[in-house]
Structure formats: C-alpha cells, structure tokens
Image: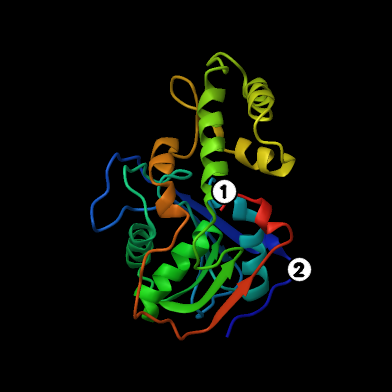
C-alpha cells in the first residue's frame, strides 16, 4: 500500500533524462527521453505510471499532472517523449508498432515488469497497441481522447497544413532574435493558418533555439511522411487486452491535434 499525500507536492522529486538524437531506428526500438517523479517521503510498491503525450506534445505537457499523481497515489510517474518529439531521437520511420517497441525498451531499461499506461491522443494509440501486443506488461490502461478507429482524412489534411505552415514560419525567424521576439514572430506567421488560439499556443511550445537557428522540437519531416501511420491504428487481428482499462474524453477534444 502507498501513503496518500494530497496536500504537499513539495515532497515530489523530479529527474529528467534525455537521449541523443539519431537519424534511424532499428527493429529493437530507440531509447526515449523522460522525466520521472516520485515521493521523497514514502515508498510505493505499486506499479509506476507511464504517460505518453499526443501529437506535437512532449513530457513537459504533463509536469503538473505527474506531480499531482505522485501526491495522490504515491506511485512513481514517468512522462515520456515519444520518438520524433521532445528530446527523444529523431528517426526516419514512425508507426504505432515501432512506438510500442520503444515503450517496451523503456520499461526494460528501467527494470519495469508492468506499469499503468496512460496515453493521450496519439499516445493513447501507442498505449492500446502496447496493451494488445504486450498485455502482461500493462497493470492498467488509461486512454484519453482517442479511439482505435480510422481518423477522417480531414484530420490528415489539417495536421499536414500545420506542419507545412510551421516549416514556412521558421524562414521568418532570425537566429539573432531573442526567444520572446522569435515566439512573437512565429505567432504572427503561424497564426494566419492556425485559427484556434489554444492549438496555436500549444504548437508554439515546440519552438526552441538550436545550435545555429530556431527550430521545432519535433521532427516535422518524419511526421509529414508518416502521417497516415499516425492517424490510423495498425491491424492487430486476433489480439485482445482483458486487463483493467479506462477511456476518457476531455472537453473540446475533437478540436485538438490527434
């Protein structure tokens, strides 16, 4: 059993590990960047929680929720960057079977025999694929804002429009600009295409200053070339997951990227 610490989140310890970029992945998966959160005042024997973000997201989107989970459940929480996102490796290929393999590698690297898997949107499809192909490693499954069905082609078109606009936006940002000035310039150009204010601000969280110029944190080239692999689940006929599971939908979820 784990002691519940609902009030004092100052007892949560944060650790961040980042992987170096690579340009290609093999069948054994890639090592993922992550942030881990755990209580400094109690020990918990329950399975940890592993969180998988959605398209264009990163582990940083889950800081507050991760800390709250530790405070309320006592469980250790890992928030991951999936391949081609955040600080995880950039690869030329991307689909849910590969991302499930990445997740398996992450668990094995941490010595995790099972975990509670929470996936949002794209991350939810990674979680479902993982549960179907490796059910013994899933203590429970939580899927948010996504279903195991084909996404309408309008979603492909919308996301591809975002990606092309984001690449075009970088042409208007000088390396000499300060970070606030670069973000303001990016907001001006990207805002002409992305009309939804919340989505625009979410996308802008990916802007960062690279070694020679500003860049987007995710791998836009691979996301564009592999978009159909992201907007549809793989065919996993005959596989079932019979463990504990929860599905949830947030308000206005249909208006967010997959």
Residue for point 45% across, 37% down? 220
- Mark 1, secondary structure of its residue: helix
Q: Which residue has dot 2 on it?
A: 7
The part of the image, by quadrant, that contains residue 91 is top left
User: Residue 108 vs residue 17: left or right?
Assistant: left
Q: Residues within 10 Å of mark 1 (few under 14, many from 20)?
A: few
Alpha carbon distance from label 2 to label 1: 44 Å
Question: Quarter holding the N terminus?
Answer: bottom right
Q: Nearer the viewer, residue 46 or 239?
A: 239
Residue for point 37% across, 55% down? 95
Q: Nearer the viewer, mark 2 or mark 1?
A: 1
- Mark 2, secondary structure of its residue: loop
- Compared to 212, does 116 lie above or below? below
- Compared to 171, does 24 lie above or below? below
- Compared to 232, does 55 lie above or below? above
User: Residue 73 vs residue 56: left or right?
Assistant: right
Q: Which residue has dot 1 on it?
A: 154
Q: Position of residue 62 (x, y in %)?
A: 61, 55
Kindly indicate whether the residue at mark 1 contacts the one at mark 2 (C-beta within 8 angstroms): no
Q: Position of residue 212 (x, y in %)?
A: 44, 19
User: Residue 184 vs residue 79: left or right?
Assistant: right
Q: Nearer the viewer, residue 45 or 172?
A: 172
Q: Can you see residue 85?
A: yes
Q: Residues within 10 Å of mark 2 (few under 14, many from 20)?
A: few
Q: Position of residue 128 (x, y in %)?
A: 46, 70
């Amino acid at each position: 059993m784990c002691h519940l610490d609902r009030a004092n989140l100052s007892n949560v310890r944060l650790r961040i590990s980042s992987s170096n970029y690579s340009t290609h992945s093999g069948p054994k998966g890639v090592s993922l960047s992550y942030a881990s959160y755990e209580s400094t005042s109690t020990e918990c024997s329950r399975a940890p929680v592993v969180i998988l973000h959605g398209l264009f997201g990163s582990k940083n989107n889950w800081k507050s929720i991760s800390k709250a989970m530790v405070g309320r459940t006592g469980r250790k929480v890992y928030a991951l960057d999936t391949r081609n996102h955040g600080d995880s490796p950039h690869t030329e290929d991307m689909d849910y079977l590969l991302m499930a393999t990445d997740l398996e590698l992450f668990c094995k690297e941490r010595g995790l025999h099972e975990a509670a898997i929470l996936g949002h949107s794209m991350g939810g499809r990674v979680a479902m694929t993982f549960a179907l192909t490796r059910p013994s490693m899933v203590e429970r499954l939580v899927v948010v804002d996504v279903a195991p069905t084909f996404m309408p082609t309008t979603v492909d078109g919308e996301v591809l429009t975002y990606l092309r606009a984001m690449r075009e936006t970088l042409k208007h940002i000088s390396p000499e600009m300060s970070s606030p000035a670069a973000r303001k310039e990016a907001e001006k150009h990207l805002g002409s295409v992305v009309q939804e204010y919340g989505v625009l601000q979410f996308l802008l969280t990916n802007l960062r200053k690279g070694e020679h110029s500003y860049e987007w944190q995710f791998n836009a080239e691979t996301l564009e070339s592999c978009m159909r692999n992201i907007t549809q689940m793989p065919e996993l006929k005959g596989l079932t997951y019979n463990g504990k599971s929860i599905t949830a939908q947030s308000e206005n979820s249909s208006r967010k990227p997959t």
